[in-house]
Amino acid sequence: KARTLRGGKNPSDFDTLAAACAEAGNFADAITYENHYLDSLPDKDEDATWRLNLYEQRKPYHEPQKKTDSSLITSTLDQ
């Protein structure tokens, strides 16, 4: 729906759609959409190529979790 609302002019929509498909277990579509995304770029995107590799291994992409400083959490809880 987002691609329709934007007139299909934002290539990163393919990247987002690929991640959503992979998360839902639909790796065939994830691969298709990630390839569309890569094909729409003027330059090579190593991160997108890495995500495509994940989808080909039937693994979803998850953004890395930000690390929290556990000492900050502990000191806040102790107050």
Image (spheres, rainbow, N blue to C red):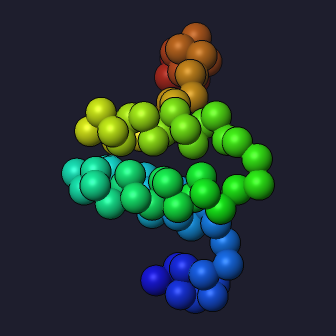
At 49% from the left and 54% from the top, the residue drawn is: 35
> Based on the displayed image, in which of its 4 quarters is residue 52 positioned?
top left
Query: Compared to 68, does 12 lie above or below?
Result: below
Q: Position of residue 66 (x, y in %)?
A: 57, 28
Q: As drawn, which residue projects farthest toward the top?
A: 71
- Asked whether the viewer can see residue 62, the reply is no
Give the number of callouts: 0
Residue 71 coordinates in the image, percent (x, y) = 58, 11
Question: Which residue is pictured at 28% across the width and 51% down the height?
Answer: 27
Q: Which residue is at a point 22% across and 51% down the rendered structure image?
A: 25
Residue 11 point in image, percent of width and height: 64, 66
Q: Position of residue 45 (x, y in %)?
A: 67, 41
Residue 78 lies, with reference to residue 48, above or below; the image says above
Figure quadrant of residue 79: top right
| Residue 1 seen in the current view | yes
Residue 55 falls in image quadrant: top left
Q: Residue furthest right?
A: 42
Asked whether, in this view, residue 42 is left or right of residue 10, the answer is right
Q: Does residue 42 appear to the left or right of 45 in the view shown?
A: right
Q: Please name whichever residue, 54 or 67, is drawn nearer the observer in this view of the structure.
A: 54
Out of 79 and 60, give the one closest to the viewer: 60
**Residue drawn at x 37%, y 55% as measured from the top left:** 30
